Image (spheres, grey):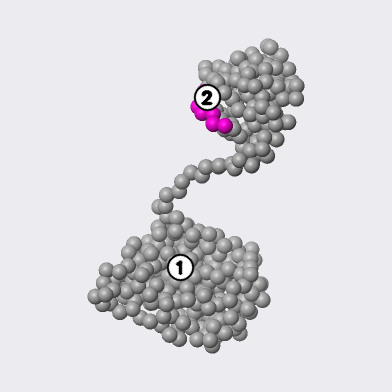
Amino acid sequence: MFFDLSIPVPTPATQFQPQSSKKNKGKQPVVQSQVAQQNVAFSPVQISKLESRIDLLVRLGYTVIAFNQTIKSKVDSKGHVNVLDPLLKQLKPRPGVIFLKRLTIVLDEDSEKGNGLTASNSSLLALYDLLALHPTNQTALSSACLTHTQPSALTTHIISLPLTAPRLPFRLKHTLIRTAIKNGAVFEINYAGALHGEDERRNWWASARELARVSKGKGLIVSGDAEANTDLRAPRDVGNLLTLLGLAQNLTHDASTVTPKSLVLRAQTRRTYRAILSEPTLIMPAGERSTLASEPIVAVKLGVLASTSDISGSPIPDRPDARVNGSSLQIRPDLETLSPLAHLTSTSAASVHTGTPKSTAGYGAKRLFDSLDGDEATVRMMQTTDTESTIKKKRAKTGQNI
């Protein structure tokens, strides 16, 4: 599975810009954005170009594609329009190919006053699968690495650097880069900059090598960011290109497979940040109980070993001499919790023996029955003063096996 997380999206042919008025006053940003999306449409020429580019990416081997919408300075709740949702509706679906939505914010001098990554805009940003930052100065880079990579509902997981600039507008410090990687962010390398112009190629090679040196090849992803189909390259070719930056082959392979995959999974945590998760409860249908009855289910009730059903499905009486196929059931004393589905999750939690009935009085533990509802039982083990060595000595004297 190969990833290309940066496919530029052209400006829509028709786009409605919401205007502030008394009628729209008091409306939520999401409502205004949904109204604006209804008036966004891409021309047939734009759609055909994107379709051909997607077909070429799929033919090259990419299965996860992210469409990138870029805005400057900040996210404005009044004027921001999500153009990716209308775009995905106009594209034809492809089996086995995943489309993602990405928003990239260019951080410049105007972003120092505010970039829009606030709680009031969380509903707008929640519509995107990936959030990325493109810093253009030292202050923006420090803010992107230290502040916006912290776990929150507005966490940005991609930091894209201007590798084709005449000179990097900031210094890549080890502390900033490694802190961002430790927080879960990744740095993006767009290989399209190494294909155009003599000056741009020279700048790209110098900046990309510096990034690879500082990061030591960790926390890097590679994307296309290609404007034309002729700039697209296969994943193996891109890996060979990255080896010229001084990266090992396993790191170049991870830059287009393992690292972006973990990034996409980690980005989903924005939607569950500070969410309330309920404890799952297994409710078995009536028809499934007959299936479970074919397996011996062991339960302990007030220190008496019992089973809900034997192999044939007939109930077993709740008394110490209960037998299955003519043999009594025994349970190890180190059992702490046993449920009807314990044999499905852990076969070593309890050991069931068949043979001569043995007394459980010398096991040095007390079983406290909490609840018994149908086929379920909760057993708690309460340790007593008998130590493990004492138990072994007692069993050795009586000739019992552990």
Image quarter for residue 315? top right
Visible residue check, residue 283: yes
- Residue 26: x and y in percent read 27, 68
Disc 1 designates what residue? 128
Residue 315 against residue 222 in the figure, above or below: above
Query: Residue at the location (42% across, 76% down)?
Result: 37
Q: Is residue 183 left or right of residue 19?
A: right
Q: Quadrant of the N terminus?
A: bottom right
Residue furthest toward the top? 397
Q: Position of residue 54 (x, y in %)?
A: 60, 78
Q: Residue at x 73, y 17 (%)?
A: 356
Q: Which residue is mark 2?
A: 369
Residue at x 55%, y 70% (from the top left corner): 99
The answer to whether one can see residue 150 in this image is no
The span shown in magenta is: 368-374
Q: Position of residue 57 (x, y in %)?
A: 62, 76
Where 305 falls versus 274 (above or below)?
above
The secondary structure type at the circle numbered 1 is: loop
Question: Would residue 176 be counted in the magenta stretch?
Answer: no
Mark 2, Cα crowd under 10 Å, few <14 / some 14-19 / many 20+, is some
Relative to 251, residue 293 above or below: above
Indicate the quadrant where residue 34 lies.
Answer: bottom left
Residue positioned 34% across, 76% down in the render: 79
Q: Where residue 48 sits in the image (x, y, percent)?
A: 57, 84
Q: Earlier in the sequence, mark 2 or mark 1?
A: 1
Q: Quadrant of the C terminus?
A: top right
Q: Amino acid at mark 1?
A: Tyr
The type of residue carrying mark 2 is: Phe
**Residue 369 within the magenta-colored segment of the rendering:** yes
Which of 230 and 200 lies nearest the eye of the viewer?
A: 230
- Taking depth in this image into account, of 182 and 56 the one nearest to the observer is 56
Q: Residue furthest left?
A: 22
